[in-house]
Image (spheres, rainbow, N blue to C red):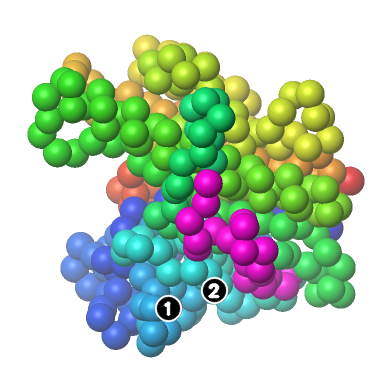
Amino acid sequence: MKLRIAVYNVNWMRKLFHTDGTPITTGDIGKRSQQLASITKTINPDFIGIIEGPDTLVDGSKTASIQLEKWASHYALNNNFKGIHGHPSSGQQELCALYDSSKIKVAFTPTTDSKNQFNEPFLVDTTNKLIKEQYKHYRPPLELTINNLADEHFSKIIIAHTKSKGIFAPVDYAKFEQISERDRMRLYAECMSIRKKCNDYIEEGHNVIVMGDINDGIGMDFYENRFNKSALEILLGDVWEQEMILTSVLPKPKWTSNGWEPSSSRYRDRITEDYINVLIDHILISNKLKLAEAKVWNPYLEKEDNIIQSISKDLKAASDHFPVVAEIETT
């Protein structure tokens, strides 16, 4: 089976809905909602992971799934689109997904093992000092199982939005350094937890897909070089266990005068105030999944892609990230 999958940080999608969960369709908010809908329709995914999706209330009176379905229906994206979500996050940005129910079955299948639940605290040694620290996912990663319509297993999928490295409060340099190290350790911890779950799945014989806004790349900044590791490389796995490795659907980015290429977002450097292009949105796949093609739908870079250029204005205005799109199949 071949699937067209995507991941997209849509930038505070909860702001696109009324308090009753219906989509806002007027004004600037309605315009952005229309832009996101146009992008999604053009991608035409079988499955799209949504980062910063609409909120889910703990009592279940409002969920990301229902709001996504209302949104997809209003903009006539795909009559077969169904929404799915998992554990509510501690904040107001949810992990969720839309999928084509005429092609695949998708279920929320969180692990019941009490030692490895994404919505519970966990212990890991982030500093290699043989001392485990306790952490908890701020946004519990979304664990899903994808089957075809004949209930034949295709893959386990984990959608993640790991700890931001951004520091937004005014601080002096010493405090900035302290917070930076703390945030980096938490980022590593979250990815170690996800990687452990990937190991479990692969050992059980499952195909695995990890997608999301990881807030990190491969050796791209001072701290990644300082600690000799990156969150993304933790997710990729151990080079000495080749059967366990996940691979990126994208090529290794190259440094250019504007930052990294390919890139899925950009940020303003705190010191120079220049904008730097970064690749922090990723899709990773296990060995038995075959990649047909993949790219970041970045209109600044994909100038020869007529489909991407046809929605260039929407891509530039709808979100501060660009979607990553891939076609994969089982080998």
For the point 46% across and 14% down, the residue is 225
Residue assigned mark 1: 63
Up the image or down, 218 lies above or below 94; here it is above
Residue assigned mark 2: 83
Q: Quadrant of the N terminus?
A: bottom right
Up the image or down, 225 lies above or below 178; here it is above
Label 2 residue SS: strand
Badge 1 vs badge 2, beta-carbon distance below 8 Å: yes
Residue 148 horizontal side relative to residue 222, left or right: right
Magenta segment, which residues? 104-123
Q: Amino acid at mark 1?
A: Thr
Which residue occupies the foreground of this view, 137 or 160? 137
Image coordinates of residue 43 in percent, x first then y, are 56, 54
Residue 6 horizontal side relative to residue 215, left or right: right
Which residue occupies the foreground of this view, 260 or 35? 260
Q: Can residue 282 be seen at all in this image of the molecule?
A: no
For the point 48% across and 56% down, the residue is 121
Q: How many other residues sit within 10 Å of disc 2, few (<14), some (14-19) or many (≥20)?
A: many
Mark 1 or 2, nearer chain start: 1
